[in-house]
Amino acid sequence: MADSTRSQGLLPSLQQVLTHGLITVLAVAIAFALPQAARYILYEWWPLVERDANLLLATELGMASVLVLLFNSARIAWDNRQRVAMAKLAALAYARNERRDWLSQRRERALANRLTAARDACILTLTGHDTLVDERSLLLRAVRTAYEIRVMLINPVGAGLRRRVESLPPEFTLSSYHKEIEASIACLAQLRKAGKKVALKFYDQMPFWKVIVLGDHVWVQHCHAGIEVKHQPEYVFGLQHQNPRAGLYIPFYTYFLEQWNQPCHPEYDFDTNELVYRDETGNERCRAALGEPVHAPGCATNTPAPKKAAAPGGVLPAGAAMLTPR
């Protein structure tokens, strides 16, 4: 990992050296060309313009067009300067829409490549499939190389998932969501066996934000009802070390921590395939098999729910994936 970090630090340095060298060569070329251009305009071009009315008119139109372009460019640069200042205040490092061209994909890939040394990964999402399982995910390598991984997924038998499925087109079913959740749990289990510190929790409410924190950057997408999250605009906010209070990195990171620390969200036990419910002080109240509905009053009375074994080859109990939206 040290070699990869060193190579990543060397590449930007070489790019900066080449950029500065190119700018220096261009400045020298312009400086040497100015006397020649001035001599041509004064002694060759201007005498021709004085004797030709059409050429004079064309020159005036050309100069007017150049001035219009310069003034418009200056106005656009001033407006962009204000936008850049606002983006800097919000700590916006990157933003993309659903439609991406090759340049935006290259920028996003370059940003993701700088996160391979991230120690912690915090993920609050729906099923986690697009981030943890899909090989096309640009954040997949950064998540897999992180040492401590904390993930929050939607409860496969919760009311929030049912409402989410009901808001989507008919091709999205509870069964498809269950399969994606199973794949994400299997991926996390493999990372846990590889020595990673992995913790998984489930939430029941309707999702509102998808938040992924990797090192000093946070990826944010709005979970709009009726629209897949991957079709929503994505925003990346960075931590400003000189002024950490500025920007939206801290608010979204705090949002994840608040959700993570709420005792109403059960933690998944990878060894027993059970959800562990805790009270305000962190003490265990009860356990229930993943995929089995749990009634809050039963947990409140410290009455453990009956254990249910996982289905062979799957994470959810048998029949859980066959639920249909109400």
Image: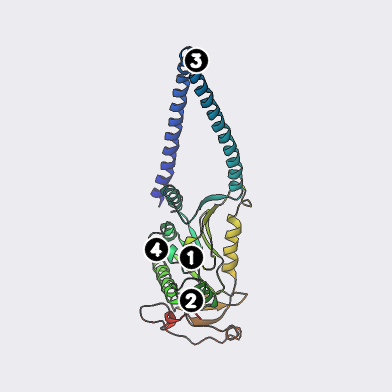
Give the label, 3 or 2, closer to the camera: 3
Q: Earlier in the sequence, mark 1 or mark 2?
A: 2
Whether pointer 1 and pointer 3 mark residues with C-beta atoms closer than 8 Å, the reply is no
The local crowd at label 2, few if under 14, some if 14 to 19, many if 20 or more residues have their Cα within 10 Å, is many
Whether pointer 1 and pointer 2 mark residues with C-beta atoms closer than 8 Å, the reply is no
Camera-side residue of 139 and 33: 33
Quickly name the residue at label 2.
Answer: 156
Residue at 41% in and 77% down: 315
15 lies above or below 104: above
Check the image and tell me how it is coloured. Answer: rainbow
Quickly name the residue at label 1.
Answer: 228
Q: Earlier in the sequence, mark 1 or mark 4?
A: 4
12 lies above or below 286: above
Residue 195 visible in image = no
Residue 228 in picture, x, y percent from top left: 48, 65
Q: Earlier in the sequence, mark 4 or mark 3?
A: 3
Circle 1 — which element? loop
Give the label, 4 or 3, closer to the camera: 3
Q: CA distance from mark 1 to mark 3?
A: 64 Å
Q: CA distance from mark 1 to mark 2?
A: 17 Å
The local crowd at label 3, few if under 14, some if 14 to 19, many if 20 or more residues have their Cα within 10 Å, is some
Q: CA distance from mark 3 to mark 2?
A: 79 Å
Quickly name the residue at label 4.
Answer: 134
Quickly name the residue at label 3.
Answer: 46
Residue 31 in picture, x, y percent from top left: 48, 21
164 lies above or below 97: below
Q: In the rendered structure, which amino acid carries the disc numbered 2?
A: Pro
Circle 2 — which element? loop
